[in-house]
Image (cartoon, rainbow, N blue to C red):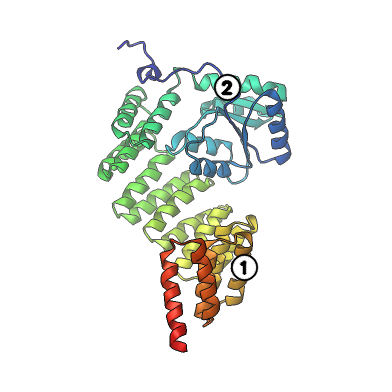
């Protein structure tokens, strides 16, 4: 092996010469008018597919739900509600569930220091707003070329992430170890190695890697997020919460930090702890639908139905036709014995989605709780007809029919 080889060459990463207009583009911009104009003109310039989002949070959840979706290049505005361009970039670069592409940040009339800061953060390109549409293609081509430079270690990190996601743990570990040898002050390779250890259920070993990562960089947020996961899997919930809170302290306005912690605490059924942690987001003036949904679920679990209803309504205010949120509201009303409101909510869901299993089932349960068994039976039969594998509903139908028989 020649010592002049780059890491990309060592691991067989093929160089890509230029941006292909057939590759989809990810456009994240909160100003709808500008987003539509850019989309229109990029289409005229030859780009075939442009996927648009109003903020980085929406884009991340799309990528999480569509893990095979790839993009040739991403354009993200720096300042956006909920999740701005830099925080979005940090997530797609660091988190192995995402595949990143060449990344260009859009800055509004920046001075020299802000342009230098963007470069220090590792972005591949900068678009200065208001930018001329004729400059887009040259700027994106330049960003693409920078990202795909064989000397760029980000290509190797992306390969390590792909191997980790494919559960090729030995290969992923080898890549991270090589990156650690070439980046002796970086915490990233050690956090990658810790993620592999967690996947292998070697949580104590993961903690050792994370201790070394912190020694290298005490401000690297993902060290503390991963340590929280490792502690949680070791049933050291209190230690896990301390780590999640520290990650939040380092990045208090990033919704992903709250979501990651809440999801894990839900799995552990530590709902009061989830409330305490998510309340930090409220204190930091954060408000986004998933936050209020998480809080509603947590308050529901501790039987604080009034607070659960308040938060799920806040989520619905932002997404009025979100079926999951409406179903949550219906359940909250039902459990707090506000049957008329529950009935209205379930009817709204059924109007939006006539085959919705949760609404059909929960409304039938509510009717039965009020002694309206004939109506409950009709509704649950409709539910079973549309969802024949719904065994719980079948058992409830038998129970309802037996109650009717006894009453005769």
Q: Are the residues at dot 1 and dot 2 in contact (C-beta closer than 8 Å)?
A: no
Sequence-wise, the earlier of marks 1 and 2 is 2
Mark yes or no: residue 362 visible: no
- Binning the other alpha carbons within 10 Å of mark 1 as few (below 14), some (14 to 19) or many (20 upward) gives some
Q: Residue at x 49, y 56 (%)?
A: 278
Task: Judge whether 332 appears above or below 24 on screen.
Answer: below
Q: CA distance from mark 1 to mark 2?
A: 48 Å
Instruction: Describe residue 79's horizontal placement relative to residue 371 as left or right.
Output: right
Report whether residue 292 is seen: yes
Find numbered disc 1 in the image and state the secondary structure of the residue it sits on: helix
Could you say where residue 36 lies in the image, as x and y percent from the top left?
A: 71, 36
Looking at the rendered structure, which numbered label has been put on residue 20? 2
Closer-to-camera residue (48/95): 48
Residue drawn at (73%, 33%) of the image: 37
* Depth order, front residue of 233/277: 233
Residue 74: x and y, percent? 57, 31
Q: State the SS at label 2.
A: loop
């Amino acid at each position: 092996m020649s010592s002049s080889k780059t890491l990309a060459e060592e691991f067989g990463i093929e160089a890509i010469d230029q941006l292909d207009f057939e590759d989809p583009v990810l456009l994240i911009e909160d100003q709808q008018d500008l987003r539509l104009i850019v989309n229109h003109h990029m289409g005229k310039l030859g780009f075939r597919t442009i996927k648009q989002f109003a903020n980085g949070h929406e884009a991340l959840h799309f990528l999480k739900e569509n893990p095979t979706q790839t993009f040739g290049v991403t354009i993200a505005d720096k300042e956006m509600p909920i999740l701005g361009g830099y925080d979005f970039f940090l997530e797609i670069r660091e988190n192995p569930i995402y595949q990143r592409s060449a990344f260009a940040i859009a800055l509004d009339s920046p001075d020299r220091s802000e342009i230098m800061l963007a470069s220090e953060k590792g972005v591949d390109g900068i678009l200065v707003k208001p930018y001329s549409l004729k400059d887009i293609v040259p700027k994106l081509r330049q960003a693409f070329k920078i990202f795909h430079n064989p000397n760029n270690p980000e290509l190797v990190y992306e390969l390590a992430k792909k191997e980790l996601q494919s559960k090729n743990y030995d290969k992923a570990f080898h890549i991270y170890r090589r990156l650690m040898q070439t980046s002796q002050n970086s915490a990233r390779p050690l956090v990658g190695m810790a993620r592999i250890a967690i996947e292998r259920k070697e949580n104590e070993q993961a903690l050792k890697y994370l201790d070394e990562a912190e020694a290298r960089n005490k401000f690297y947020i993902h060290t503390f997020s991963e340590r929280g996961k490792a502690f949680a899997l070791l049933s050291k919930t209190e230690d896990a919460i301390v780590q999640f809170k520290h990650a939040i302290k380092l990045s208090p306005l990033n919704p992903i930090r709250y979501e990651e912690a809440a999801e894990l605490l839900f799995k552990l059924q530590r709902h009061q702890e989830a409330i305490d942690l998510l309340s930090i987001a409220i204190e930091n003036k954060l408000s986004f639908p998933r936050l209020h949904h998480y809080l509603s679920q947590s308050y529901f679990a501790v039987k604080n139905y009034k607070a659960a209803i308040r938060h799920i309504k806040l989520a619905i205010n932002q997404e009025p036709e979100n079926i999951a949120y409406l179903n949550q509201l219906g359940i909250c009303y039902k459990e707090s014995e506000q049957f008329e409101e529950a009935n209205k909510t379930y009817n709204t869901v059924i109007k939006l989605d006539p085959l919705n299993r949760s609404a059909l089932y929960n409304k039938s349960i509510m009717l039965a709780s009020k002694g309206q068994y004939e109506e409950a039976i009709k509704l649950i039969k409709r539910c079973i007809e549309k969802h024949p594998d719904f065994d719980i509903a079948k058992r409830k139908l038998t129970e309802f029919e037996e109650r009717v028989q006894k009453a005769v």
